[in-house]
Amino acid sequence: MTTAPSWLSDVVFDDNGLIPAIAQDAENGQILMVAWMNAESLAETAATGRAVYWSRSRKRLWRKGEESGHQQQVHELRLDCDGDVVLLKVHQAGGIACHTGRASCFYRRLDGEGSEAAWTTVDPVLKDPELIYK
């Protein structure tokens, strides 16, 4: 039986045992994605240096890049002041973090004002998702 690392006691998980995790490019600071982690995925990430998240839709651990090959090598883990958000500074393999084939999941920007405002896609697809996920 393995015991949880003592540093995990400083992490504030929500009622579902999860904490939001922000993945940021360690080199240029770009926010790549937001996902969820539980104690097991956070501990595995810290132990292996590879980003592991909790997939709420699949209800299981999600080792980033397990299907696409676009793994995240973690250079630094940070905890926010309230202990309820984790920041992962990562190297993104292949330069693609989003399942849409883009560098970042934040590829849409709100343009315009008032009722004329609309989301505009501002970042290109780097690789067709059909070629990534088979």
Image (cartoon, grey):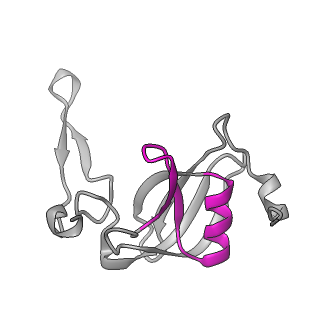
Residue 84 inside the magenta-drawn segment: no
* Between 113 and 101, the one nearer to me in the picture: 101
* Between 31 and 7, the one nearer to me in the picture: 7
Which image quadrant for residue 86? bottom right
Residue at image coords 17%, 44%: 120
In the image, farthest residue toward the front: 1
Query: Which percent across, then down, holds residue 111?
Result: 20, 39
**Total residue callouts:** 0
Q: Decide if residue 67 is on the left or right side of residue 110.
A: right
Region in magenta: 38-64
* Between 47 and 30, the one nearer to me in the picture: 47
Query: Which percent across, then down, holds residue 109?
Result: 25, 45
Query: Which percent across, then down, holds residue 130?
Result: 15, 63
Q: Decide if residue 83 is on the left or right side of residue 35.
A: right
Residue 51 inside the magenta-drawn segment: yes
Residue at image coords 29%, 66%: 103
In the image, farthest residue toward the top: 115
Query: Which percent across, then down, holds residue 87?
Result: 58, 60
Quadrant of image for the C terminus: bottom left
Residue at image coords 67%, 46%: 84
Which image quadrant for residue 100? bottom left
Quadrant of image for the N terminus: bottom right
